[in-house]
Amino acid sequence: MDILQLLVGGIANGCIYGLLALGFVLIYKASEAVNFAQGDMMMLGAFLGVTFINASYADLPFLVGITLAALILGLFGYLLDRFVLRAIFGQPQFAMVILTIALGFLIRFVAGVIWGHDPTSLETPFIGRVWTLGELMIPVVDAVIIITTVALTSILYFFFARTRLGVAMQASSQNQMAAYYMGIPVKRINAIVWALSGVVAAIAGVMFAAKGAVEPSVGLLFGIKAFAAAVIGGLGSLPGALLGGLLVGIVEPFAGRYLPSGVGQIAPYVLMLLVLILRPGGLFAQISQKKV
Amino acid sequence: MSNRFKSRYDDDINLFEGRWHLAQYAILMALLLAAPWLLGTYYLGELTAVLVWSLAGLGLMLISGHTGQVSLGHAAFMAIGAFTNLALMLRGWHFLPALLASAVTSGVIGAIISRPILRMSGIYLAIATLALSIIIEDVAIMAEPITGGVAGVFAPPIAMFGMEIDRYATPEAFYYLCLAVLVLVTLGYLNLLRSASGRSFLAVRDSEVSARALGVNVARAKTLSFSLSCAITGLAGALYAHLAQAVNYESFLVLISITLLLQIVIGGLGSVHGAFFGAIVVVLLPQLIAIASDYLDNTAGIQIAAYPGLDTALFALLILLMVIYEPRGLYGVWFKVRTWLQLFPLYRKGMFRRTRTYLKTERQR
């Protein structure tokens, strides 16, 4: 029973990692860039959620609050791409890494100034409620997180596989010039995908704040862990991101419980290094040998 | 601008291009040697910190700037260097062999790690090294006999040439020690860059495929570069331990790794000057903010100190502007100014126009 209980907690945590990893994968899939500020965008989403939903702030219903947070962060992502990231359009990938790291620092500072540095939790309608299955206790929060994640992953998967916009995004990441020739507005596509990843980050953030407490500096390490999850799954694969997130989420509590202290924290990174060394492209490798 | 006539092949790789160039560096060296008489104790300490971070920046510059492999985990090697040095000194070693040992240890560990890690490239390498930095952070807590666990270790005083060198008791001696190490490493670095190995690093950075076609052993070049880079960073870590007097796992957080990379980006990737410029910014920016905040508090009554983390935010803003407007960093700015002066009436605006490339997927190699 103990193991099952750990597993449930691990899966719910893993789903949040997976949600955040989805944001990484979205941007990577569409523009082959990595957004190191994704964790900080999630933090921003969490604070927006707290601002809209908590009784001491705006006191809106849960669903309205989460929608507003997602819309605002989506707009933020769009504007970020339009006014900051477009300035380095056409520069090497490495420039984007540095730029987003710097953006992360800035977002963290601004959030600290606005919301302060005390950990804050989200007040959800299902706070503290638990379903019991025999001896197994499933907090309703965990169930909500798992359902949201699975739904969002499938929607995004079909979006990329089936819709015109999704296919255009994949095309523009594979070869920008060819995408231009085919009449794809590459710059607008980039802006849209940043907006989309903002929406996903906001949902991940609200889930994060519903399960734990949020403060401005959570974004950095949480983001790195989620990025590790995305890499484990194979950057560029949406189901891979979810699987990677689940693996990271499950490994963490088990390593913390059954291995010497201190190992639990580094277990996700060790797992990622192992995956990278044994399967350099991740579990769902997106890398294929170029045919000459 | 004087035009020098090259009569020997060696003229192309001479460390100094002519007398004037040599004189410039001689003046700089003289100024640095005279610094203890020119600066107060506090600013001498800050200058020492600049030297130490320059050394760390040089280490990272070798692998990231000159070999093109981005590492986001070099604080890990600073930690290895620092803890090796202190652990050996506490067990009765003399400072100099312990310093060498810390360089060798981090170099060897770097070489061992580099084989699996350097098979990755680009973003995968960045995240792998980042993970390494986080892992070392926790290992530093767990390896208690060497690292002193959470509490950390204190640096013993350095006994050398019949005198005791201590950061606080004899700041000048410690300053000269750091300066000597930095100058030696810089000269070695410049020599390396003009040797066959160094030029093979540059070839690997510019294009792995062409480097391989020209007969460069890419794996060997990368491993050598990574291990030398780790050794230099290890030296910097050892000196940092004596500068800070006490180190624990918190001295080498993953944030330090990231800052170190940002430091060399702001200085200018791919230039030796860049490591120094970056270190100057990283060390002196908080000072500048402190001075500005005192000034604003006294004159306008604005209290900047109410916003913690302002220095990191300003640093990040600087990076942001740098990446957008001047990707070659402060060295790029300096280079442009120098060219403008040298060519005085003839400088054209489009001289340093950046080329844009169309992105192609890295997923098909």
Image: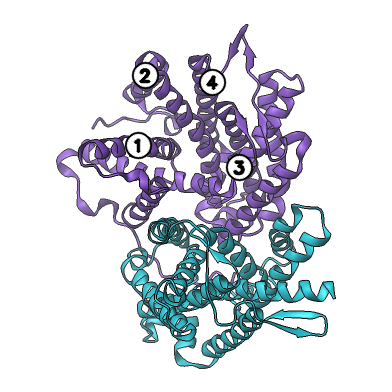
Chain colours: A cyan, B purple
**How busy is the neighbourhood of tag 2: few (under 14 within 10 Å), some, or many (20 plus)?**
few
Dot 3: element? helix
Give the residue pinned by disc 4: B167
Label located before the other in sequence (2 or 4): 2
**How busy is the neighbourhood of tag 1: few (under 14 within 10 Å), some, or many (20 plus)?**
some
Which residue occupies 40% across, 57% down?
A: A106
Same chain for the residues under marks 4 and 3 in the image: yes
Label located before the other in sequence (4 or 3): 4
- Placement of the N terminus of chain A among the 4 image quadrants: bottom right
| Distance from the alpha carbon under mark 3 to that under mark 2 | 30 Å
Which residue type does callout 2 highlight? Leu
| Distance from the alpha carbon under mark 2 to that under mark 4 | 15 Å
Give the residue pinned by disc 2: B39
Label located before the other in sequence (4 or 1): 4
Label located before the other in sequence (3 or 2): 2
- Label number found at residue B250: 3
**How busy is the neighbourhood of tag 4: few (under 14 within 10 Å), some, or many (20 plus)?**
some
Which residue occupies 20% across, 52% down?
A: B349
Which residue occupies 79% across, 80% down?
A: A136
Which residue type does callout 4 highlight? Arg
Could one spot residue B114 in this view of the protein? yes
Give the residue pinned by disc 1: B290
| Side of B208 where B300 appears, left or right | left
